[in-house]
Amino acid sequence: MASPQETPHRLLRIVDANLNRIGEGLRLLEDIARLLLNDASLSAELKGMRHQLVGGEVGVQEQLVSARNAAEDVGSNLEVPGEGHRRDLPALVMANSRRVQESLRVLEELAKLPTLTPPLDQARFKQSRFRLYELEQRLLSKVLRHDKLERVEGLYVIIDSQALKGRSQAEVTRQALRGGARVIQLRDKQHSRRELLPIAQEMKKLCAQCQALFIINDYLDLALAVDADGLHIGQSDLPLPAVRRELPIDKIVGCSTATLAQALQAQSEGADYIAVGPIYPTPSKETPSLAGLDTLRRINQEVSLPLVAIGGIDKDNMAPVLAAGASAVAVISAVLGAQDAETASRELAARIEAERKDQGGQHKR
């Protein structure tokens, strides 16, 4: 049992150990946000929290290091079954967030001791703990959507019911997927949600079989009902923050934009990818105001999200679109207007791949 003289020294060991856990856990979370997700805002917030909590004054740091006694730490070799086997990245994020939160709580409680020297700021640890709850949610949601975002590239086919000319959505989806489509979006302004439900369910099944993403246009309730991979919204649809609150955290949201200002706003409000267009004149929009290649280039320079170019794109004019920064090319007429949707999709996918190779494989993730 520690003597009264030894107790303050051993309490400093507790402080030191928990500050180390906080620094280590936050550094891992920060590196995931910065180097894996390329999220400047999250990484900056996590870095700021880490420096605020574990930076400290030099004199205080010297006291903590002096109190350290790793050689006699009876817990250094203790292992809990399964503790060393994190199954995936989301589990790693949750485990390290919990590690930091628990250490913050320990320090918050120790701060209540009047005899502890140097004294601890109880309010700071409590505020940081509650702040980390929110940061963990944001980081985990980004990690859970990361795999889906990696697949927002290549050929993105929009199955617009108005352009099907009597063909079924499922059949054209099947053909587009066989031709190499990486993303399928269902857009339908003709049918009720009740009518669309079985159609969307079949399309989701076909996409899952081909490891392609299935996106619903506009209809949040339908996306939830069929467990789609994500939702795509326009400037006149539900506000993006409201959509994000309603969707599960592993679902992606794309947003249509025509200007740099709209793209920057979509990014700040939580979009996962941004559609830019129309790039060229298109029959799917009446007398559209073109965004054009210049806007696509400007958005590519200012926005860190994957960009999906849309509007009048075909195999003959897509090269400058990809060169301007598009990760994916969204088409309607180039596939749905062809006699053979599978052949048209294959030609488009092949052209995208060829252009990527010519450009050195560089595109935004």
Image (tube, grey):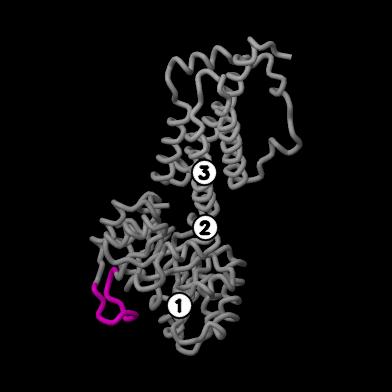
Q: What predominant SS class does the magenta segment belong to?
A: loop
Q: Quadrant of the N terminus?
A: top right
Give the spatial CA distance, label 1 vs label 3: 41 Å
Q: Which residues are magenta?
A: 279-289
Q: Position of residue 128 (x, y in %)?
A: 49, 38
Q: Which mark is residue 187?
A: 1
Callout 2 amino acid: Lys
Q: Give the number of the disc on residue 148.
A: 2
Q: CA distance from mark 2 to mark 3?
A: 29 Å
Dot 3 crowding, Cα within 10 Å, few <14, some 14–19, many 20+: few
Numbered circles on residues, count: 3
Residue 114 position within the rendered picture, expressed as x and y whole percent measured from the top left:
56, 23
Pinpoint residue 154: horizontal percent, then vertical percent: 44, 61
> Where is 137 relative to 335, above or below?
above
Nearest-to-viewer mark from 1 and 3: 3
**Image check: 213 left or right of 43?**
right
Amino acid at circle 1: Arg
For label 2, count other residues whose C-alpha is less than 10 Å away and answer few (under 14), some (14-19) or many (20+).
Answer: some
Foreground: disc 2 or disc 3: 3
Q: Farthest residue toward the right? A: 81
- When the figure is inspected, residue 289 is found, relative to residue 329, above or below; the finding is below
Residue situated in front as seen by the camera: 231 or 320: 231
The mark nearer the N terminus, 2 or 3, is 3
Residue depicted at 52% across the width and 81% down the height = 169
Of residues 268 and 173, the one drawn nearer to the viewer in this rendering: 268
Q: Which mark is residue 130?
A: 3
Q: Give SS at disc 2.
A: helix
Badge 1 marks a residue whose secondary structure is: strand
Q: Amino acid at mark 3?
A: Phe
Instruction: Name the secondary structure under disc 3.
Output: helix
Residue 94 coordinates in the image, percent (x, y): 60, 44
